[in-house]
């Protein structure tokens, strides 16, 4: 699931609008993650966030194909 | 729903206009909504309407003959799109889809002409908006034509996975990777897709698995 930096969130709700799995809601005007197995890590929420308040980080590992 | 004059006032196109001017412009603005993934514009079609995003977000992109997508930009509330065909009379430069549900304000090409004739300040604002757009696109052209961004992303992934222990290896967002290789987030997304198509990596939700280090080294080429 994405990570939210609460102090950077301006409550614009763009992330909530673009999230197709309903994994984000605004609570007290701050983006908040709702745990869901539907999240496929599309990272659209991070892409649209105007303040950099959402992070979708990747772990980079060596592995089998 | 009526067009919100306060919102019009906040749009760079209409910056510095007085209430009477905004009121006149409001008469020419219409509202349109679009659902997730709905096409708002098709590349190559006649460009008849200038749009402003009121709420939600829109993705502007070009598609290659092979179906590959290159995002030009993500348009957020207050920003405009489809400016170019409205002013030069040519076809739509790119396609645009709604990323989620969106509300847009639109102004027809004919009405934009009327606005420019009656409100010269708008012309100066338009010049500024278009200049910013050219600056953004010039930077994207530089990335796409002159710089081996895919190779740099490949190099970054190799260095990250190989030369650090787990505790020294913070997880990276696409934005952070972009900053590290000196490019835009859109270019990192594209590079990751290309590397995945090559079979060099596998993206497994929040994990990038390097599945073919030789292919990555080859892509990184002379950068290593």
Image: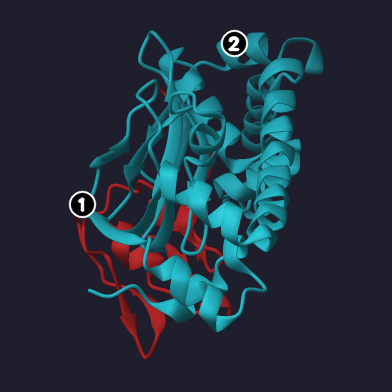
Chain colours: A red, B cyan
In which chain is the residue bearing label 2? B
Tell whether label 2 touches label 1 (CB within 8 Å).
no
Residue count near mark 1 (Cα–Cα under 10 Å), binned few <14, some 14–19, many ≥20? some
Seen from the viewer's position, the closer of residues B8 and B135 is B8
Residue B139 in percent (x, y) is at 73, 34
**Of helix, strand and loop, which one carries label 1?**
loop
Which quarter shows the C terminus of chain B? top right
Q: Is residue B201 at least partly visible in the picture?
A: no
Q: Residue at x 75, y 20 (%)?
A: B147
Seen from the viewer's position, the closer of residues A46 and B197 is A46
- Asked if residue B1 lies left or right of residue B143, the reply is left
Residue B35 in percent (x, y) is at 20, 52
Q: Which residue is mark 1?
A: B35
Residue count near mark 2 (Cα–Cα under 10 Å), binned few <14, some 14–19, many ≥20? few
- Asked if residue A65 lies left or right of residue B171, the reply is left
Alpha carbon separation for disc pair 1 and 2: 43 Å
> Which badge, 1 or 2, is on the more N-terminal residue?
1
Residue B213 in percent (x, y) is at 57, 17
What label does residue B214 carry, if any?
2
In the current view of this chain or complex, which residue is farthest to the bottom?
A28
- Asked if residue B179 lies left or right of residue B111, the reply is right
Q: Residue at x 42, y 58 (%)?
A: B53
Which quarter shows the N terminus of chain B? bottom left
> Which of label 1 and label 2 is nearer to you?
1
Q: Residue at x 57, y 10 (%)?
A: B215
């Amino acid at each position: 699931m994405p990570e939210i930096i609460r102090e950077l969130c301006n409550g614009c709700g763009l992330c909530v609008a673009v999230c197709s799995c309903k994994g984000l809601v605004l609570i007290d005007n701050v983006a908040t993650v709702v745990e869901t197995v539907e999240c496929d890590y599309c990272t659209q929420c991070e892409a649209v966030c105007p303040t950099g308040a959402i992070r979708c980080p990747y772990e980079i590992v060596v592995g089998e194909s | 729903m009526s067009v919100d004059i306060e919102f019009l006032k906040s749009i760079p196109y209409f910056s510095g206009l007085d209430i009477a001017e905004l009121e006149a412009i409001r008469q020419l603005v219409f509202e349109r909504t679009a659902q997730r993934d709905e096409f708002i514009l098709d590349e190559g079609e006649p460009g008849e309407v200038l749009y402003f995003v009121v709420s939600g977000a829109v993705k502007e992109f070009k598609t290659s003959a092979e179906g590959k997508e290159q995002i030009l930009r993500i348009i957020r509330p207050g920003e405009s799109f489809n400016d170019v065909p409205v002013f030069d009379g040519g076809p739509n430069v790119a396609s645009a889809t709604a990323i989620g549900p969106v509300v847009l304000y639109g102004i027809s090409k004919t009405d934009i002409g009327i606005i420019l004739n009656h409100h010269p300040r708008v012309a100066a604002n338009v010049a500024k908006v278009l200049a910013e757009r050219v600056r953004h696109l010039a930077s994207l052209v530089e990335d796409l034509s002159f710089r081996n961004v895919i190779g740099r992303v490949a190099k970054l992934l190799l260095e990250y996975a190989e030369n650090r222990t787990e505790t020294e290896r913070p997880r990276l967002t696409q934005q952070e990777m972009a900053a590290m290789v000196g490019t835009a987030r859109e270019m990192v997304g594209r590079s990751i897709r290309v590397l995945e198509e090559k079979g060099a990596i596998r993206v497994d939700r929040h994990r990038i698995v390097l599945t073919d280090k030789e292919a990555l080294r080859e892509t990184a080429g002379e950068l290593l």
